[in-house]
Each structure stands twice: as structure tokens, then as C-alpha cells.
Amino acid sequence: MTHSDLSPAKIEPGVSVGQVLPPLVFDLALPVLTYFVLTGFGVAKLLALCAGGVFPALNIARTWIRSHRIQPLGVIVITFIAIGTAAALVSGSVFVALVKDFLLAGTFGLLCLGSLFVTPRPLMFYLLRQFIAGEDPVRLQWWESLLQRAPFRAALQRVTAIWGIGYVLQAVIGIACAWWLQPAQVVIISPLMALCALAALVAWTRVYLLGLRERYGLAAPAA
């Protein structure tokens, strides 16, 4: 699971360079570069992997500073990074260091799927609300009111299920890669897989919700 620079906004087509570049730098380029530079200087693979994990956390901190608020999802991600890094260092296992991000992805996927059965408001209701309504009271009230619409409730269920399945599959494939491939290969594959999965899910969700908006007249109030 990667940590892209998304901010609360309307669901509209088009993504700016400013949104795409930070995840590519912090979640892909810097961790990969750090691993190969450090191991090239003789640093142990385990320490190089843990050092590379610092940059996604820095990206989350950067978004907090930029938005002047701490986002719950970011807290969860940083907590998982810290726990995974600590577990890898304590166990001395390169494999644990390689799979910690996949375990985060799998946990997120299971939480999505589990929320479909335990609450009328699945997990993606809250995540989409953060990105679409932000802190605007009018938009928040509008978002809550959409729960009265059966098509919207069904759409939330479908979106949450798709995200859940997607992240569970990502975790399974990633852990298999970590088991069979060399660490240097996994270091490259892991962020690429995470970014591609996120991009595909975001693109599908955007198109799907835009179609829902047009079909059922669910347009947001003007900001």
C-alpha cells in the first residue's frame, strides 16, 4: 500500500503533476535508490530496507504539514511502518522487512471487506468522504445525506469490495514475490505494484462515481 499525495477535492477527471510526482519520488525512487546505494557500500540488506522505509513516512508528514491537519489514514500507515520496521530489526529477518508493506496492504483490504459485514457505512465511505467533502460543513452534510439513496449505498458497497479484493490480492502476490525472488528484485517490484494498484483503483473509482453522479444526479454542492 503506497501513500499518494491526495487532498480533499471534488471527484473530477485529471491529475496534476504535483499530485503524481511526490509519491513517485518518496514511495518509489528514494526507497529503491537508498537500498542500492547502501548495499553498494556494504550496508546489510536488512538495514538498507529499513532505511528506505523512512521516505514514505516523510511523505505523509509532508502532507500533514501542507494541509495543517493530521489524517487518520496517515497515522495508521505510519504506525504500520514503525511496527513492521521494529519487527524486522528485532527478528533480524530480511523477509519481514520485505513483506511489511504487503502486510499493511492486506490488512487494509481485510478491513475493507470486514466493514461490509459489520457496519452500514463501509470503510470507503469514510475515506471517500475525506477526499471529496474535506472539512466543508455543507459538503459533509451532503455526503451524509447520500446514505438515504439506495444507489449510493450500493455503490459504496461495490467500491469497498473492489478495493478490499484489490489490496488482498496485492498482498498475496507481493508476499509470494518476497518468498521466491531476490531482495533487490522485490525492492523494485513492491513500490511499482503498490503504485499501479492504487492508480488503477483510483481511476476506476473516479470513473464509476462520475457515472453514478450523472445517472442519479448526485452532484456535490458548490464549494
Image (spheres, rainbow, N blue to C red):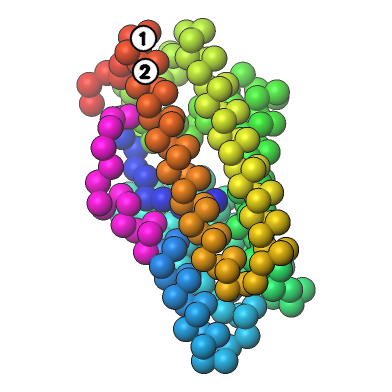
Q: Are marks 1 and 2 in contact (CB under 8 Å)?
A: yes
User: Would you identify the image quadrant in which residue 21 lies?
Assistant: bottom left
Residue 183 horizontal/vertical position (percent): 63, 72
**Horizontal relation, residue 1 to residue 68: left or right:** right
Residue 210 horizontal/vertical position (percent): 35, 22
Relative height, residue 142 to residue 46 (above, below): above
Q: Residue at x 66, y 67 (%)?
A: 181
Relative height, residue 191 to residue 6 (above, below): below
| Image mark for residue 211 | 2
**Horizontal relation, residue 14 to residue 107: left or right:** left
Report if residue 119 is visible in the image: yes
Please name whichever residue, 138 or 35, is drawn nearer the observer in this view of the structure: 35
Please name whichever residue, 33 or 64, is drawn nearer the observer in this view of the structure: 33
Disc 1 to disc 2, C-alpha distance: 6 Å
Q: Residue at x 47, y 14 (%)?
A: 152
Which region is colored magenta?
A: 10-25
Q: Is residue 21 magenta?
A: yes
Report if residue 83 is visible in the image: no
- Quick one: label 1, few (<14), some, or many (20+) residues within 10 Å? few
The residue under label 1 is: 215
Q: Is residue 43 magenta?
A: no
SS at circle 1: helix
For the residue marked with disc 2, what is the amino acid?
Gly
Q: Residue at x 39, y 57 (%)?
A: 23
